[in-house]
Image (cartoon, coloured by chain):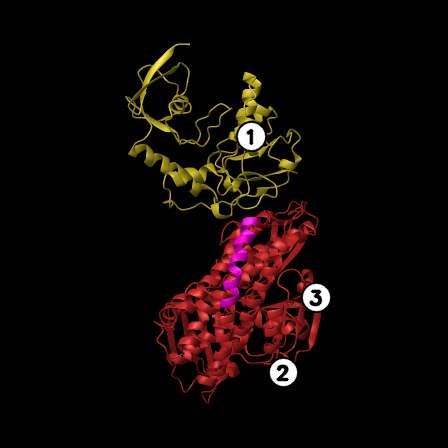
Chain colours: A red, B yellow
Amino acid sequence: MSKRIIIDPVTRIEGHAKISIYLDDAGQVTDAEFHVVEFRGFEKFCEGRPFSEMPGITQRICGICPVSHMLASANAGDALMAVSIPPAADKLRRLVNLGQIIQSHALSFFHLSAPDFLLGWETPVAQRNVFGLIQSNTDLARAGIRLRQFGQEIIEVLGGKKIHPAWAVPGGVRSGLSDEGRAKIRAWLPEAYATARVALDLFKHTLESHQTEVEVFGNFSSLFMGLVTPDGSWEHHGGKLRFTSSEGALVADQLDPQTYFDYLGESGESNSYLKSPYYTPLGFPKGIYRVGPLARLNICERMGVPQGDQELANFKSMGQGAVTSSFLYHYARLIELLSAIEFVERYLDDPELTTGPLRADAGINQLRGVGVSEAPRGTLFHDYTVDRDGLLQKVNLIVATGQNNLAMNLTVAQIARHYLRGQEISEPMLNRIEHGIRCYDPCLSCSTHAVGQMPLRVRLIAPDGAVLNEVARG
Amino acid sequence: MAAKTLIIDGKAVSAEEGATVLQVARDNNVAIPTLCHLEGVYDVGACRLCLVEVAGSTKLQPACTTKISEGMNIQTDSDRLRKYRRLTLELLFAERNHVCAVCVSNGHCELQTLACSLGLDHVRYDYVFPKWKVDVTHRLFGMDHNRCILCTRCVRVCWHIEGAGTKNVAGRGATAKIISDLDQPWGDSESCTECGKCVMACPTGALFHKGATAGEMEHDRDKLEFIVNAREKQQWLP
């Protein structure tokens, strides 16, 4: 029983992280581990609750991506009821997810990551944050903050509030899009496009002077996983799963998320509360895969919107087969951001959005249901088993940050190997390791990084297990 | 019936003999917090939220069950009363699992509204965190004992408005609970008429429409008063 508890709580990991770097006799880095040492327990205390309450409960896992949990949960509810939700409800759910992607990606880029490469690795921590960015580049910071607001406004227009809207429910959604809400979103579009463009240009300019980062920040072979449409286009809600390799080869396609357990295994690490999922046909750790913006762009053939497709072509030219550097998560994120704005515009003109019913009604028709949605950070699974009355018996949540856990370990080791000289843990090296983690935009950075740094402990461990050096921050 | 004269919060008022302090206070626009009181059914004085001070008595009296008398001097608001009301609410919150943020009645809950109005921003007692099973065996309704405050409104409307007598109280003290028939799953109850009056009456999210999601459950408590007025006074007033 205690083992299960250790494996379970990947649900929210913002806050405290620990990194161990292992050295060989020659003092060279052999391995690194990124530990998340928090326990949330959502999977356990949801047991016994009615499934209809789950979107409201599970979205409390996170204040940044509550919409993702709400959607995956509602989706799992649809599966338990065995219903197809009304077309308008499906489109409205997609619209709210686009709002979620926009606000979270804007947060990741402008508030969390941009200060590192715009202000420089050597900049003191006190200035290398969003407030430093506000001081040095006021217009950019304001535009970034407003772009996040745009995404939040979409969520509020649909769900009634920006954070934790109890709006998507098993069977559909609770309310439609008003004319007033539609006009409000439309009025924001020109500004949102302009800011997304500025961010893209800025990052492409940054890349010119950051080729070392592209080379060493998590640049390795792995599988990539995410949702795609039936014709292989970018997908964020609904759709089926696809795996591709670093060479760009199709490994598996159109896998049904309902049976994810047939091809995804979960390896529990004793030193971390994160579970490490892997693609079972290739085994552990060969089946390591990455999720999130980088993976979604690697697996899809097109975005399905003009500006996004143009950027996707440029993105794909950066890799042979797939784009393998995790530093380019940032670029992928910005392409998704731009594409999401284009999709929002498309939905606003869709007459089907305001027609017909919004909520299918049914009892329990299946005792197990899996919900899946692309959260900003990657594919999110909610797997519920219920009794005949709809009370939760078992809950399994597979969260994006957990799926990227192994990749984050490799990233930390790669950065350490490149920058570590002797046993000294220097501030710029610490900053780079931190940023290596930040490329994945894991939830653990949500709470504290916004004011400059994540609580981080780095330990150098000799072959005999002796701790050679240890630096703690936060 | 004879009229009685009394003082409420320093103001002289008169009312018919047999009226309760609560009725007279409300007729004179004096607000007294209540939880177990429900228009349309008799009072039981269970929640102790409506306690008032009566001059000449050191004991606090529940306004809902205390009948007025000539020359009574009543205080409905004081530091002492606020302290007791807050304490009562804190104990209610500590006793079961009231998680407003994800509750079906969030925003439409009388317990939550009262707690807000009395400035209850924290509870000084350890939460008990009891394990109560949710009963969603009924076709239409659910019962979550975690959110029940044992006001017995559901029992009273079931027996005295609907006349079905499905709902009852079993057990004692902190382990007391609302049951259906002889403590069987609600869905198995043979006496339940599925009228939904108990759900309308519930002050919290303990009784809800099946499938309700966070904040979605709105209890139509006025409907009960409407039914009683229609039946007893032949008045069909909305």
Query: Where residue A342 sits in the image (x, y, percent)?
Result: 59, 64
- In what element is the residue under mark 3? strand
Question: Do badges 3 and 2 share one subunit?
Answer: yes
Q: Is residue A424 visible?
A: yes
Kind of residue indicated by mark 2: Gln
Residue A275 percent location from the top left of the image: 56, 67
Q: CA distance from mark 3 to mark 1?
A: 51 Å
Q: Is residue A191 magenta?
A: yes
Q: Quadrant of the C terminus of chain B?
A: top right
Across and down, in percent, residue A188 comes to: 51, 59
Report in which chain the residue with disc 2 lies.
A
Q: Are marks 3 and 1 in contact (CB under 8 Å)?
A: no
Kindly identify which residue carries mark 2: A320
Q: Residues within 10 Å of mark 2 (few under 14, many from 20)?
A: few
- In front of the other: label 2 or label 1? 2
What residue is pinned by disc 3?
A: A255
